Image (cartoon, rainbow, N blue to C red):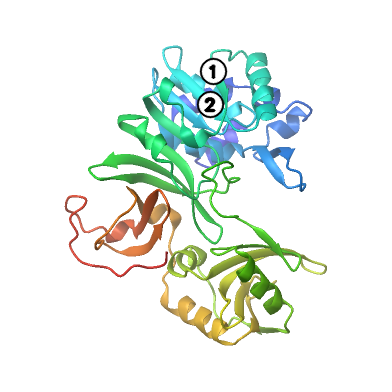
Amino acid sequence: MVDRLITVGCVRGTAVEQAFRTVPRHLFVPGVAPTAAYTDEPIVTGYDADGAACNASSQPSTTAATLEQLAVAPGDRVLEIGTGTGYDAALLAELAGPDGAVTTVEIDPVTAGRARTHLAAAGYQGVEVLTGDGWSGVPERGPFHRVLATVGVWDVSPRWFGQLEPFGMVVMPLWLRAGLQVSVALRWDLDRFTSTSVLPCGLMRLRGQGAGPEAYVTVGGRSVCLEDTGRDAVAHLDRVLAERTSVVPLGRSLRPGWFTALALAAPDAIQMAWLDPVRGYITASGVFDPYRGGLALVVPGRGAAELHAHGDPGAAERLRMLLDRLPPVRVSDLRIDVVPAPMSGPVRGDLLALLRRPNATVVVRRRSGWTGGPAGHPTRAVPEVGA
């Protein structure tokens, strides 16, 4: 497994490599055959009352890339938000070494109890597993050199930053819009936290007081992700999906990064997935206008992609216009600033999105568009994109 992680570039440093070679993953997923435990696949370990997966051992390549971002050094004090099986906490303990300390917080007491059992079986009794809402952090164990969230976050807890040592690092899977989630490593830079690296990821969302709005809703038998998952928007979408679908070839090729560009530029971006009896599992992305009753989706085909339009044709026209105008964006080319909310005044640089959350403002730019100069001193005003 580790050899494969090195080959694909997820494991780059000797410290992360040694941690992965040392921690026995199969002890953290009892009941799973070792051959399955050491594949590069996530392993679901818990379900909620509705039967949806709510706990998992993350895909090892995702974990490895995250740990490389976090850059834990021997002697570091590390806070983990979301214990899960305890496997990531064991890896952190290896990286922090005997002079460091790992504190991990799990909101579900049953999951926390199992993690303690797994860690003890693997010989990591020194990892402190606490039951509670990780949104609050653990002030009595801080300050920390590193904070790692292993669950997707829509908003950013000010307590994580407040419990951080100067020049410390926070790594979190940050939810941007319409299913677009990135793993961002953040350091304090004058008046904000600024990314040192941004990678694509996809992890289950945080539960508890900082969870934010619903990530996914089911509409017309489809799993749907959009900015507004309120009752009215869902009802409008249900009606639009019931209308006749117009299917035409898209008439163009789409380069990698088109969805990232669309999700950042369009507050009405939408992503949905469903099981088609003929074509199998389909994931499609586009725009949804609940006011005019229009939905347009780019649906991958066996050959060229298709444009599926429902209801008002304006949505399809808008989607075509966006695809014509928006250059693709690679996640790794993003620069993300997290500014303690509220933030006012103009922003500078090649702005892609300005996302206002209750506890933070998330500023997303192209890294190549950075104009230099000290943070907090705008060089030119850029209109706000989205909310």
Q: Is residue 103 above or below residue 258?
A: above
**Relative image position of residue 204 (x, y in whole percent):** 61, 45
- At 71% from the left and 44% from the top, the residue drawn is 53
Residue 216's disc is none
The residue under label 2 is 104
Q: Give neighbour class at mark 2: few <14, some 14-19, many 20+ (Cα, 10 Å).
A: many
The total of numbered circles placed on residues is 2
Asked if the residues shown at circle 1 and circle 2 are in contact, with their CB atoms under 8 angstroms apart, the answer is yes
Residue 353 in the figure: left or right of residue 212: left
Res. 12 in view: no
How far apart marks 1 and 2 lie (CA) works out to 8 Å
Q: Nearer the viewer, residue 219 or 120?
A: 219
- At 70% from the left and 73% from the top, the residue drawn is 238
**Relative image position of residue 144 (x, y in whole percent):** 38, 26
Q: Is residue 243 above or below residue 228?
A: below
Q: Give neighbour class at mark 1: few <14, some 14-19, many 20+ (Cα, 10 Å).
A: some
- At 42% from the left and 67% from the top, the residue drawn is 386
Give SS at disc 1. loop
Q: Nearer the viewer, residue 21 or 150?
A: 150
Q: Nearer the viewer, residue 194 or 140?
A: 140
The C terminus lies in quadrant: bottom left
The residue under label 1 is 127
- At 51% from the left and 46% from the top, the residue drawn is 153
Q: Determine the residue located farthest toward the bottom in the rendered image.
A: 313
- At label 1, which amino acid type do we have? Val
Residue 48 in the figure: left or right of residue 318: right
Q: Determine the residue located farthest toward the right in the rendered image.
A: 277
- At label 2, which amino acid type do we have? Thr
